[in-house]
Image (spheres, grey):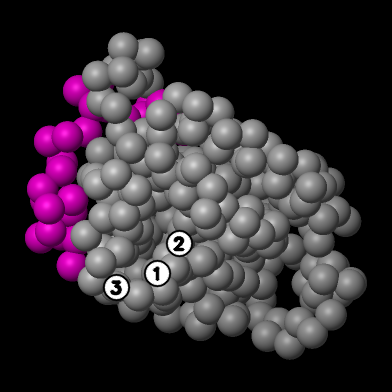
Amino acid sequence: MSSSGTGRHGPAATAGAAHAAGPAAGPWPTETTEDVRAGAAPVAVLPIGSFEQHGAFLPLVTDTVVACAIAREIAAAYPVRLLPPVTVSCSHEHAAWPGTVSISAPTLYAVVRDIADSLRRSGVRALILVNGHGGNYVLRNVVQESAGVDIRMALFPGSADWADARDRAGVQTSSQSDMHAGEVETAILLHAQPELVRPGYENSDFLADERKHLLTLGMPAYTESGVIGRPALGSAAKGKELLAGLVESFGDYFSLLAGEDGDGRGEADRHTSGAPRAGGDTR
């Protein structure tokens, strides 16, 4: 767990650095071009969600809501440049359910790469992808291939970040069991946008821990409802603590990528080894 809460760039030290107009209204950043000029944030944050089924009680836009909730909390605590979300991504395993929309992995790769190039040209030195959908595997490649280029990148939250946040929030379902529309996602929406959660989550629990051929067969092979997890255990209190835990973990990433010396290497680079934790099975 990061000690960012007490560090130079942690939430306690930077809460006053958030933009005067507020970093976001819903999923949308509200700054003007002059706000961005004055802030000159060296790190940009890009929420990436999806548009896919989440059972009968959570909206298709759930993963985007989750990614935006995380990014919004980050922007309130750290001096970062918050970007609007990518709202459609790689949801092919959910194609059997009405409403799901996907783009190909090469398209998502190209979109993120183009955004990174645009940011680089405007002087941003680092981009952190806040991923809300575990099926966006290609984002790992985007980050991996960014090593050594002009803009540094990281994928957040990683599996360790989720584990710390889950422990903090008292999440009862294991990460293996809480795969889709389960305790974590329901909890975050109950906290961040409860009006989006419809009745029925209280009795929609369904577990399918053995999913060996998920990529080949898709979700219909393992669930009829579209749910794999225990949404009944979700609560607004858990959602609040999950987000707080992720904001705490973000401090490691910010310190790593917001280096202030000439080559972009900051204090964290000189005192830690290895790359930023790449995103794991995010929810």
Q: Quadrant of residue 93?
A: bottom right
Q: How many marks?
A: 3
Disc 3 or disc 2, which is closer to the eye? 3
Q: Which residue position holds label 2?
A: 157
- Relative to 279, does residue 160 appear above or below in the rendering? below
Question: Which residue is tagged 3?
Answer: 272
Q: Earlier in the sequence, mark 3 or mark 1?
A: 1
Q: Which residue is mark 1?
A: 161
Residue 105 seen by the camera: yes
Question: For the stretch drawn in magenta, what is the main secondary structure?
Answer: loop
Amino acid identity at mark 3? Thr
C-alpha separation, residue under disc 3 versus residue under disc 1: 17 Å
Q: Is residue 25 left or right of residue 77?
A: right
> Residues under labels 3 and 2: Cα distance?
18 Å
Q: Position of residue 161 (x, y in %)?
A: 39, 69
Which label was assigned to residue 116? none
CB atoms at circles 3 and 1 under 8 Å apart?
Answer: no
Name the image quarter holding residue 108: top right
Could you tell me which residue is drawn at 36 percent across and 13 percent down?
A: 32
Q: CA distance from mark 2 to mark 1?
A: 6 Å
| Amino acid beneath label 2 | Pro
Mark 3 surroundings: few (<14), some (14-19) or many (≥20) residues within 10 A: few
Residues in magenta? 3-29
Q: Quadrant of residue 265?
A: bottom left
